[in-house]
Amino acid sequence: MSDNQHCTVAVVDDDESFREAVVWLLSSRSFNAAGYADAASFFAKHPIKALGCAFMDLRLGDLSGLDAYRQTRERGFDMPVIMISAYGDISTAVHAVQLGAFGWVEKPVRNEKLVEMAVSACAAHEQICKQYGRAVDYVRNFSLLTPREREILMHLGKGATAKEVGLELEISHRTVETHRNQIAEKLGLKSARDIAAALFHTRHFYAEGSVE
């Protein structure tokens, strides 16, 4: 990604000096960087549709970084998230990556490492947005689904057929197909390609346990 100005990077860390230093560093490299002292500020102020990534501390004041990461997915933020640790907590950082985080860095971290991670994460997000287009927005409309539709989408997202879902939930496959059509309509999925992309993202979000 050659033009960093198109990339918005959030730095979520309650360490003011570190946060401001990273924001300054990224801004000096032409990123559109913004700092947040806690997860609540990030969720309230950061543009949900921004192309970019987020650096998020593992130990925030209002909630843990892992919980904050899960909430980014529940709230519809699809940007890559890079976890930051000052405590050498490698196991927690690895767990975050297993949940779907883009990567992790440990304080103190070299400036060039931060920039490299930001460039890579922004490029990855740009590729996702180009490849899936509107499909990445489906998570933001997830609240429109009924509990039954969410349940069916969960199974479909794991690769089950309508017949297999019907057997699992003890309903007819035609009922499953009706729900699938309603899901597609509510999430704004018009084509087979859109649905396939949405199901890909469903598998991703359920695999990391971020949507309940």
Image: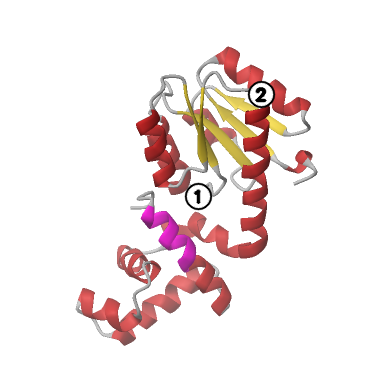
Type of amino acid at the residue the image marks with label 1: Gly
For mark 1, what is the residue? 76
Q: Residues within 10 Å of mark 1 (few under 14, many from 20)?
A: some
Residue at 38%, 81% in the rendered image = 178
Label 1: which secondary element: loop
The spot of residue 30 in percent (x, y) is 78, 32
The spot of residue 158 in percent (x, y) is 36, 67
Residue at 55%, 18% in the rendered image = 108
Asked if the stretch drawn in magenta spans residue 206, the answer is: yes
Magenta span main SS? helix
Magenta-tinted stretch: 199-207
Q: Residues within 10 Å of mark 2 (few under 14, many from 20)?
A: few
For mark 2, what is the residue? 111
Relative to the observer, which residue lies in front, 187 or 155?
Answer: 155
Residue at 48%, 61% in the rendered image = 201
The spot of residue 107 in percent (x, y) is 52, 20
Relative to the observer, which residue lies in front, 210 or 93?
Answer: 93
The spot of residue 31 in percent (x, y) is 73, 34
Residue 49 badge: none
Q: Is residue 133 above or below residue 42?
A: below
Q: CA distance from mark 1 to mark 2?
A: 29 Å
Label 2: which secondary element: helix
Would you say 17 lies left or right of 147 here? right
Q: Is residue 190 above or below residue 114?
A: below
Would you say 107 lies left or right of 147 here? right
Relative to the observer, which residue lies in front, 130 or 39?
Answer: 130
Asked if the stretch drawn in magenta spans residue 112, the answer is: no
Type of amino acid at the residue the image marks with label 2: Asn
Residue at the extreme top: 17
